[in-house]
Image (spheres, rainbow, N blue to C red):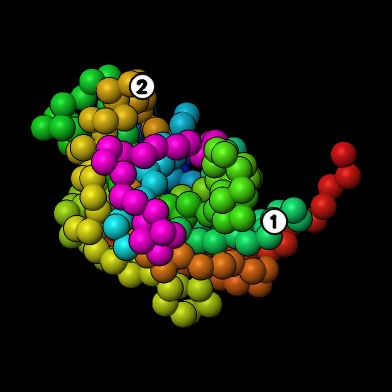
């Protein structure tokens, strides 16, 4: 099932589900008990929102060996985690803003896991029971700041630097799916999820060994090689086989006076 968050001129933001190109409302809690209404609204008539509102976004660095190599970095022996703030989240179609102080902003196509059931010390064999589904992410990064700063908070944390969407796919199999990224139609990244160093179940087990995961949390699984620059006027498309395509335009942010 594809779960979306959407709104219409007559309906405030809420969850729904897709049946072909039709949208039906969901009543209740998608992380608990809910009911699906009849799918009769055209997808073209709704505004898609970020498919989830996470309390935290947990990201994995260097989880694809070729990406680590393109930056001259070793593959970590244990998962290397960092956070992106929830304020960075935008949905499909929303613009990625190039900050006025940025020097080089890059795309990073990633598989995103949406936690459905919280927990601590989750066993890898039980990790699947804690997953609601999967969506697509773009871990937008200011590369110069990432290399210059001791920590990655600024480089990864700008507003609009965490596009998510277009929906949550509950039936997705992460074992061997192609992740690709195109900028203005030109292919930049393309690799299978089978190249990940740490599997989804291992990442969930590791993260939950020191922090509680809560429903709606999002786990980004790392990016393949081929990351590259984004400039105003670009359109970036991240596609994951079996889920769909996340598309965002890129525009220049105006400088705001303090």
Please indicate whether residue 152 sits to the left or right of residue 255 in the image. left
Percent coordinates x, y for residue 58 in the rendering: 41, 37
Indicate which disc residue 211 carries. Answer: 2
221 is higher (above) or lower (below) than 84? below
Q: Residue at x 34, y 51 (%)?
A: 74
176 is higher (above) or lower (below) than 215? below
204 is higher (above) or lower (below) than 232? above
**Badge 1 is on which residue?**
102
Q: Secondary structure at mark 1?
A: loop
Q: Earlier in the sequence, mark 1 or mark 2?
A: 1
Q: Nearer the viewer, mark 1 or mark 2?
A: 1
In front: 62, or 172?
A: 62
- Chain part drawn in magenta: 68-86
Q: Secondary structure at mark 2?
A: loop
Q: Residue at x 51, y 39 (%)?
A: 84
Q: Is residue 72 magenta?
A: yes
């Amino acid at each position: 099932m594809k779960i979306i968050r959407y709104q219409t001129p007559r309906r405030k933001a809420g969850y729904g589900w897709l049946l072909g190109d039709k949208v039906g409302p969901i009543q209740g809690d998608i992380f608990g008990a809910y009911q699906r209404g009849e799918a009769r609204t055209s997808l073209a008539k709704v505004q898609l929102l970020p498919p989830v509102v996470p309390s935290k976004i947990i990201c994995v660095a260097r989880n694809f060996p070729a990406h680590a190599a393109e930056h001259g970095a070793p593959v970590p022996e244990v998962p290397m985690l960092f956070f992106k703030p929830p304020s960075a989240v935008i949905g499909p179609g929303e613009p990625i803003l190039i900050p006025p102080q940025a020097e080089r902003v890059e795309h990073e196509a990633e598989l995103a896991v949406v936690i459905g059931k919280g927990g601590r010390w989750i066993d890898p064999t039980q990790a699947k029971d804690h997953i609601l589904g999967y969506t697509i992410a773009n871990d937008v990064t200011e590369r110069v700041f990432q290399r210059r700063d001791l920590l990655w908070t600024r480089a990864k944390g700008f507003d609009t630097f965490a596009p998510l969407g277009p929906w949550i796919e509950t039936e997705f199999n992460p074992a061997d799916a192609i992740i690709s990224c195109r900028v203005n139609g030109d292919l930049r990244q393309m690799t299978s999820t089978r190249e990940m160093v740490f599997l989804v179940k291992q990442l969930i087990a590791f993260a939950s060994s020191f922090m509680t995961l809560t429903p709606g949390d999002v786990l980004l699984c790392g990016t393949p090689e081929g990351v590259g620059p984004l400039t105003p006027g670009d359109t970036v498309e991240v596609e994951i086989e079996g889920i769909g395509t996340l598309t965002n335009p890129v525009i220049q942010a105006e400088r705001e006076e303090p």
